[in-house]
Amino acid sequence: MKVAKKVILLCLILLILPVSVAFAETNTEEDDFYVKLAIMATTNNRMDGVLSTGDYAAIANLANEVIEKKLNQLKNTKDLDYDSQLAYDGLAQYRVDLMNALLKKYNQRKKQEARDILDTIIQISSTIEDKNDAVKTIPQVISDGADSVNPSNLSTGYSDDLFAFAKDIHFDQSIDQTDLAIDTFVANIVDSTAVIDTQNENQSDNDGSSIIIGGVSSDPNASQNVLSDEIDLRPVKFVNTGSESATVMVSEFSSAPGYSASMPMASTVVFPGQSNSSAILNLPLGTYVFCFEWELDGDIDGDDYIDYKHGFTSPFTLNINHSEDPSLAVQVSISAPATNPTNGRCRGENNASTELTPEEQANQGTYAYYVTESDGNTDISEIFNSVTFNFGNGKVNVTIEGETMPFAKAGLNHYIYSDTELEMSFTFTMDGFLYTYKAEWGYDGIEYVLSNGTGIRQ
Amino acid sequence: MTKKLQILIPLFLLIMLTLSCNLPYRTNPLTAYSDGLIQNYVSRSDPNNLPSYTLSVDQTMVMNETGFPDRFTIQFDRNADRTEIWYYDQMGLNISFKNGSEISRVETNPVLSEALGSTYYLPQNFTKNYSLDDILALTSETGFYLETIQNGIIENGKLVFIKGFSLFFIDNQLRYVETIPIGNAGQ
């Protein structure tokens, strides 16, 4: 039944979309239908359980489009008479109220979807008589191990926070499907508020100091009332005014007050000239310094590796008033090559840096490793009791059973060795390493042994 | 030596040999226990002799470029197809593989939470031939939470929660692995 309702609703939405386009050109009764749909969606819980978060977002878009069109029509006449002014103000306020009501419903539905997912998890334990004990115990088993559970305490309480977090994890898996709808929805609400702030003279208390960036008021007091606390990511678009393609990544980051986020590790390539559509990073609120690196023309220093230089942007603060709509994303300009570049790459490779990455540090020294290797047909597992990695100056000396081989740094945590008969690489991780191995054998040298494996530090 | 002794001595040796191999205790924990919390269970598998999965070229490239996933799921279907999803939560990237070939790559919003870490385990640690004993040996865990799933759609299903994991077995065959790196089960 629920599926049938959703199919009907989907058909309804599909029917609405073409009408929406037509409506942009004409002012007919269909206009009101979208607003009525929004009212239905927010009144008397009549659509609860029928509409998904994506549905609420779609309805908000349609209703907002209609109201914005009417506001624009009224705007042209509002200075003519007192009644038009009242109509404009009333409709502007109505849009805020309607969008807030939809946002409230949207958040309710979002929480309900999380509960549904959790219910599914609990439902599959249908044979368990005491579900409460399962609910209490499973998060603790997953987090700390079964032996951490005191069976005598099963009915006396559990960690609410941990349980809530276990729910969040399962909820996170459904976020992907609704991301676009969330972005569109919130962007429209934010935009509508910004429009009201700047167009409604009666409501405006703008002191003239705020500016509009990407359709959103830079006044930190503006429009916060309609933003959800849960959304703290904003797109940042990079524009390269230089002549070389550059890879941009975060170099320094401090989270915005009241938020907790670790430093984003994402990067993106920015072509020179007009910004490419992929030159966007979704980042948590906070203050950033970005590093951008670009390739030089080949191997300048003769070490057989492509050389790089890098530069930095000035500190930039990403705040809650920046748009969530990628098309209205705040822009950060870079220019590659930079005026005062630094040799090497942003994160240390290719600049003879002696700083070790956490993965390198974890493996520096002598350890036993549990090594698993496969050539595609046979798997071999063996413990090597003494493997030494000695990192430094863009290389690592690897000593296994008394034999030492030098590996050259070829990337982040990635080292290679090559001679006429053997090619080998290590990629270091916090747990150990991955490795590949390719050796020629046979008199004609055309046959190879290919294998790869892992080493887990013991 | 009497005829009786000639029979008893080999029988005694057989019993001792059997005991030394723990054969009477080689029960399947999935069938030996009723639902609920099982603690202080000692795995009979040797962690040094477990089978392992070899990463494909696609997967090795992803590992080299992107590192280990923060968490992952592996599903083994009836045809022994292996479907994996590697979640790079902090980066905002999910990569799916079918039998080692990359089939999709989805950018997501980064999940930045202090409580959600990265799993200690690797996708290649798991093969479809693993028993619960094997996984307990691999993880050095001595306890788990067991739930039987028998709901008309799934017959003889066993859902198992171990520190950092949920696992699903059908007819004692491993069908699903999901790492859950929360609390002390993540780094």
Image (cartoon, rainbow, N blue to C red):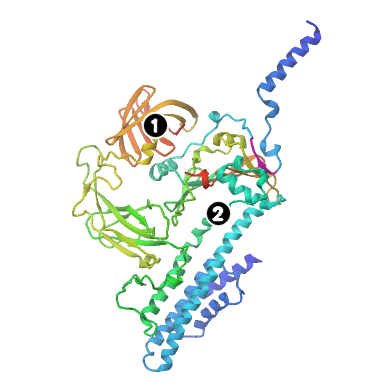
Residue B180: x, y in percent?
Answer: 53, 47
Residue A186 disc label: none
Q: Which range of residues does the magenta coloring cover?
A: B35-40
Q: Which residue is mark 1?
A: A437
| Above or below for A83 versus B147 | below
Which sits earlier in the primary sequence, circle 2 or circle 1?
2
Q: Secondary structure at mark 1?
A: strand
The kind of residue tagged 2 is Asp
Q: Is residue B129 visible?
A: no
**Res. A161 mark:** 2
Q: Residues within 10 Å of mark 1 (few under 14, many from 20)?
A: some
Q: Is residue A217 magenta?
A: no
Residue A432 vertical placement versus A345 (above, below) = above
Indicate the position of residue B127 as horizontal and vertical percent values: 55, 38
Q: Residue, x 54% and y 32% (percent of image)?
A: B51
Q: Residue placed at 22% from the left, 56% from the top?
A: A243
Residue at point 70% right, 18% down? B16
Reply yes or no: does residue B38 show up in magenta: yes
Query: Which image quarter: residue A88?
Result: bottom left
Q: Chain of mark 2?
A: A
Task: Using a 10 Å C-alpha cutoff, classify the residue at mark 2 as few (fewer than 14 neighbours), some (14 to 19) or many (20 or more).
Answer: few
Q: Which image quadrant is residue B136 in?
A: top right
The residue at the point 31 percent across, 46 percent down is A347
- Residue B126 x, y percent position in the rendering: 54, 38
Please identify the residue farthest to the top as the structure is shown. B1
Cα distance between the residues tagged 2 and 1: 46 Å
User: Is residue A14 toward the left or the right of residue B93 in the image?
Assistant: right
| In the depicted structure, whether residue A198 falls above or below residue A283 | below
Q: Position of residue A192 (x, y in %)?
A: 42, 76
Q: Nearer the viewer, mark 2 or mark 1?
A: 2
Question: Could you say which quadrant of the image residue A208 lies in?
Answer: bottom left
Q: Give the secondary structure at mark 2.
A: helix
